[in-house]
Amino acid sequence: MDIELHIARRLCPALELPPDQTGTLAGALVRPPTPAHGDLALPCFGFARSLRRSPQQIAASLAGKLEPDEVIAGAEAAGPYLNIRLNRPAVTASVLGDVLADPGAYGRRDLGRGGVVVLDFSAPNIAKPFHFGHLRSTNLGAILGRLLEHMGYRVFRKNYLGDWGTQFGFVIYAWQRWGDEWALEKGAIDYLVSLYIRAYQESEGDPGVREQARELFRRLEQGDPDIRALWARFRELSLAGFMDTYRRLGVSFDSYDGEAAINPQVRPIIERFQRAGVAVQSEGALVVEVSDVIGREIAPCMLQKSDGASTYAARDCAEALDRFERHGFVANIYVASRQEDHFAQVFAALGKLAEAEGWRENWAQRCENISFGFVRGMSTRKGEAVWLSDVLDEARDRARRVRTQKAAQNPQGFPELLGADLDEVSEAVGQAALLYFDVSSRRMSDISFDWNTVLQFEGNTGPYLQYTHARIGGIFRKTGQVASGDLAEIAPLLENEEEWQLVLHLRAYADTLERACVHREPFELANYLYALCSLVNTFYNRHKVLGTGPGLERARLALLGATQAVLAGGLRLLGIRPLDRM
Ligand code: ARG
């Protein structure tokens, strides 16, 4: 049942609007700031001109005309607003019915109509540390991917590995001097980074080292088979290390082709830039001026350095073209922070090429950089260098300690978990704590990380959301029932305010997901789920469920069942495991 559409249809004639305006009018209905103002409101300012009356007069006359029906319980004017109260039993039955009939489909919409979104996220650099920026990119990207799919897009997940560039000259130089097979096999990522750092430090005292590293990278670019084989091995071992982490996070990609794989297509696109007259020589380098299109003073997009080497930007230009040719994307999204200028330059340069070559579809306009703020205060026992697998271990171990303490204080509240179960729950809770932290603020805000805060079982944390899910699970374990019953019969029994606010919140799920998707803002979903948990906990603290008599008990269980289903679905979209006991 589309409540907004129904109300809009009823209001259209009174507002002298043609029927084709119904959808727009439905979109104009808002949630009033407090429940005392009703369930939905129509601000009447926008109709004053055409109706030649004040918004107050319009609201008053609408209130007089809107008779109660199967959806509307009543309407009152409050100044320029028309406040509408909904028919609670009907709306409750419809919302619970929608959720319980097919929980997995609840909240889905088809915004995308099957269009392909290429989603570039995580993208760590081989032989450079996987840092917190990469973890945030991994989490935000994974969530956006699931949200986009929920909204009807097809998503191609691309892990554009940083597997090319002069740093490999340093690593190969260091390997040839100090390489240790055993250390490499034992932990490739850590070891390659330490090699890189060692060579880099040495080059600071001895410029000859830099020269040798450059030469080695040149040989790699020219395809020297020995150097190439070494590079391939480093890449493979690093990727295997990343894969462990991705597996733990439940993240996967459709392609791991990174900067190296696109390399052969870089020369051809640079030539296109030249032929189209878009790229110009500047102090021996080849650049595209972009300040004019971006509208602010910004360095040009450099495609080729003065020594003839191609650049990160040139590779991204070639890569974007390749993505369009393969996928015909409706959006090409890069989840990466602190590269705003880089992406602005690349997109603007491609835009200029589009214009100069007269592309039929200017897909440069479909490229977006989704950036995010900085995380402060993240460090582990081992000190400043933060390794993702260490953080996941630490999260698991801390979660286990918190849980064990809680269970000791409150044995009834926590079922006994031992051995493998405790390991599994601890891993899931630790991961939820880390992951939820990333989405508990808007993505552009800088955030401060603190282990004690993120692992709390109360407050705006991942473990709190999981705990709420498990708490509802506990109730169903006690009754041994699943949520069921004839909704038309039981919905009228749900008549208190806590129940109604919960129903209204459940109803807002799809709108929330759409907003999160359109604004590329997973926080919207996190915030929604937090509010859902607060509402259901308030309800449960104030009202009994079990033993309230056959009808009311069934009605309240249905409400809890629907809440749990939406919570589980939302947690899964966030990449957090809904737990049945913890
Ligand atoms: N490897 C880069 C880094 O670690 C991120 C890559 C983002 N994607 C891209 N197509 N440039 O900073």
Image (tube, helix red, strand yellow):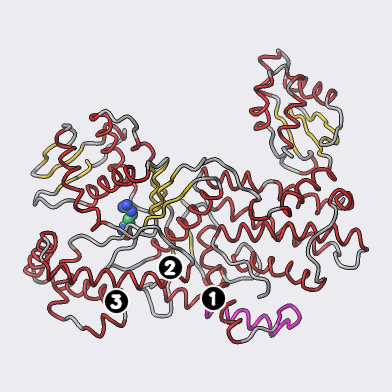
Q: In this picture, which residue range is highlighted in magenta?
A: 396-415
Please name which of the two marks, 2 or 1, marks the residue nearer to the observer: 2
| Label 2 sits on residue | 246
Instruction: Look at 30% across and 63% down and name the residue there.
Output: 125
Q: Secondary structure at mark 1?
A: helix
**Residue furthest right in the image:** 549
Please state the total of marks drawn on the protein image.
3
Q: Earlier in the sequence, mark 3 or mark 2?
A: 3
Label 3: which secondary element: helix
Structural crowding at the residue carrying mark 2, measured as other residues with C-alpha within 10 Å and reported as few (<14), some (14–19) or many (≥20): some
Task: Give amino acid for label 1.
Answer: Glu
The answer to which image quadrant residue 176 occupies is bottom left
As shown in the figure, which amino acid type bears the numbered disc 3?
Ala
Residue in the picture at 20% in, 64% down: 167
133 in the magenta segment? no
Q: Which three-letter amino acid code belongs to the residue tagged 2?
A: Tyr
Please state the horizontal and vertical placement of residue 22, each as a whole percent of the image.
Answer: 68, 26
Q: Nearer the N terminus, badge 2 or badge 1?
A: 2
- Whichever of callouts 3 and 1 sits on the residue coming sooner in the sequence is 3
Magenta-drawn stretch, dominant element (helix, strand or loop):
helix
**Residue 202, percent from left and from top:** 14, 73
Q: Nearer the viewer, residue 245 or 436?
A: 245
Q: Please state the horizontal and vertical placement of residue 446, each as a whole percent of the image.
A: 46, 56
Few, some or many C-alpha atoms within 10 Å of disc 3 (few <14, some 14-19, many ≥20)?
A: many
Residue drawn at point x = 44 percent, y = 64 percent: 376
According to the image, label 1 marks what residue?
A: 427
Q: Secondary structure at mark 2?
A: helix
Q: Quadrant of ligand 1?
A: bottom left
Residue sitting at x 8%, y 68%: 212
Return the residue at label 3. 188
